[in-house]
Image (tube, rainbow, N blue to C red):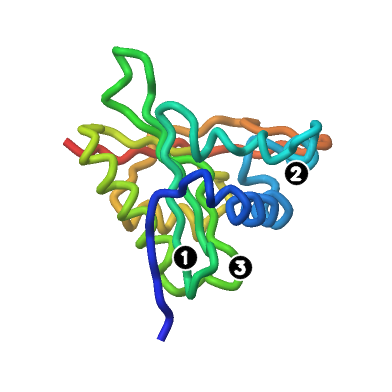
Amino acid sequence: MNKLIIRRLVEDDLGAYWTIRLEALQSSPEAFASTYEETLAGEDPKQNVKHYITGEGMATYGVFLNGQLAAIGSLRRYPLEKMKHKGSLQGMYVSKGARGQGIGRKLIQEIIQKGKEQQIEQIQLMVITHNYAAKSLYKSQGFETYGVEKKALKHKGEYWDEELMALYLD
């Protein structure tokens, strides 16, 4: 039987987070605003992703399957006074070997619960329009589409549209 633990990541998890983040950027480059190359840039590349774990208003959660980090997702609370009632689900990724086990659903449910505990009234996200599996997962958790941003991302001459979704917690 698989042992499953979902928890907020801490600075000591940076190495495991780094590994899965690079996997995500390589296997699903269209799903993330940053590129693999950008993430590796600089003298200490791990610092490029550290803010997801330790940044102000940012909480990153991980699903550990048999001790290995198998999925990640971040909840960012908007810092501006008039937007503090909203948060954003970012950087959601389930490693290829862990898919099909309900891990993504459990992670989203944990993030939603944490949002409720913070009195967040609305969680927003963006998902590539052709990522049908992710959109289906989000819809199953109550997220609704409220728009589409055409040509939201562009890399190496290729464009991707993003579907804008929100979950209303109030």
Query: 118 above or below 136?
Result: above
Find numbered disc 3 in the image and state the secondary structure of the residue it sits on. helix
Find numbered disc 1 in the image and state the secondary structure of the residue it sits on. strand
Q: Sequence-wise, which precedes: disc 3 or disc 2?
A: 2
Query: Would you call the spot at circle 3 few (<14 residues within 10 Å), some (14-19), or many (20 or more)?
Result: few
Query: 72 above or below 51?
Result: below
Q: Which mark is residue 64?
A: 1
In the rendered image, residue 134, in percent from the top left (x then y), is placed at 49, 55
To which quarter of the image does residue 39 belong?
top right
Residue drawn at (32%, 28%) of the image: 86
Which mark is nearer the camera, 2 or 1?
1
Query: Would you call the spot at circle 1 few (<14 residues within 10 Å), some (14-19), or many (20 or more)?
Result: some
To which quarter of the image does residue 152 belong?
top right
Task: Indicate left or right for 86 with 135 as reference.
Answer: left
Find numbered disc 2 in the image and state the secondary structure of the residue it sits on. helix
Q: Which residue is mark 2?
A: 36
Mark 3–mark 2 CB contact (< 8 Å): no
Q: Which residue is mark 3?
A: 96
